Amino acid sequence: MFTGLVEDMGTITRADRRSDALALAIQPQRIAVSELAVGDSVCHDGACLTVTELSRETFSVLAGAETLARTTLGSARVGKRVNLERALRVGDRLGGHWVTGHIDGTGELAVRRDLGANLVLGFRATRPLLRYIVEKGSIAVAGVSLTVNAVDHETFSIAIIPHTRDHTTLGDLVIGDRVNLEVDILAKHVEKLLNPS
């Protein structure tokens, strides 16, 4: 479980195809590799992956077929930066919202507007995802917990402050870039309870 408060931006130093999976090596900037252990869960642009190997400066993870099909990790390349967050520990402060690290799908940046201190980003998403996105609700975009500013039948928008722009990969996005999306899990549970099948 995560909160969507990004701790670090790591750089992909290796991306090796293995049958229907992708092995990635990540070099973090602020998270010390010595603080990680094999088996730890780490969120990568919102996708929860298990640490499989450690070296002096990098840690490795393996993204399977389902992850590659649902996320942007299938197009991961050496040099790309990814948002990183370690799993919550008992007693941690919850500053974002409940994020599972299980990506629902991807969205595409359609609008980018600089409004003084804030940056407004508008994303196209599929109708099946948009049904769970509500104005002033929570959403994880590339692993970042954000509040939805507005939503219509094709897009939703969010605003980010300078700290978020500077300390996550969201500030680097250009029109057409794809991002991982995780909608608020509460909406999906409520729907299931109201419409059992």
Image (tube, rainbow, N blue to C red):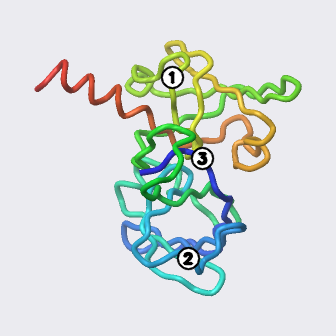
Image spot of residue 1 (x, y percent): 41, 51
Task: Give the residue displayed 76% in from the left and 33% down from the top.
Answer: 161
**Callout 2 secondary element:** strand
Q: Earlier in the sequence, mark 2 or mark 1?
A: 2
- Distance from the alpha carbon under mark 3 to that under mark 1: 16 Å
Residue denoted by label 1: 137
Which amino acid type corresponds to the residue marked 2 in the rendered image?
Phe
Residue denoted by label 2: 59
**Callout 1 secondary element:** loop
Image spot of residue 174 (x, y percent): 74, 39
Residue denoted by label 3: 5
Q: Which image quadrant for residue 171? A: top right
Q: Which image quadrant for residue 59? A: bottom right
Q: Which mark is residue 118?
A: none
Q: Earlier in the sequence, mark 3 or mark 1?
A: 3
- Distance from the alpha carbon under mark 2 to that under mark 1: 34 Å
User: In the figure, is residue 185 to the left or right of 26?
Assistant: left
Q: Would residue 78 be visible to someone looking at this image?
A: no
> Which residue in the rendered view is the most extreme toward the bottom?
56
Which amino acid type corresponds to the residue marked 1 in the rendered image?
Gly
Q: Quadrant of the C terminus?
A: top left
Q: Which image quadrant for residue 117? A: top right
User: In the figure, is residue 177 to the left or right of 19?
Assistant: right
Image spot of residue 115 (x, y percent): 84, 23
Q: Nearer the viewer, mark 2 or mark 1?
A: 1
Along the viewing direction, whichever of 52 and 93 lies nearer the viewer: 93
Q: Residues within 10 Å of mark 1 (few under 14, many from 20)?
A: some
Q: Residues within 10 Å of mark 3 (few under 14, many from 20)?
A: many
Asked if disc 2 and disc 3 are in contact, CB closer than 8 Å, the reply is no
- Distance from the alpha carbon under mark 2 to that under mark 3: 20 Å
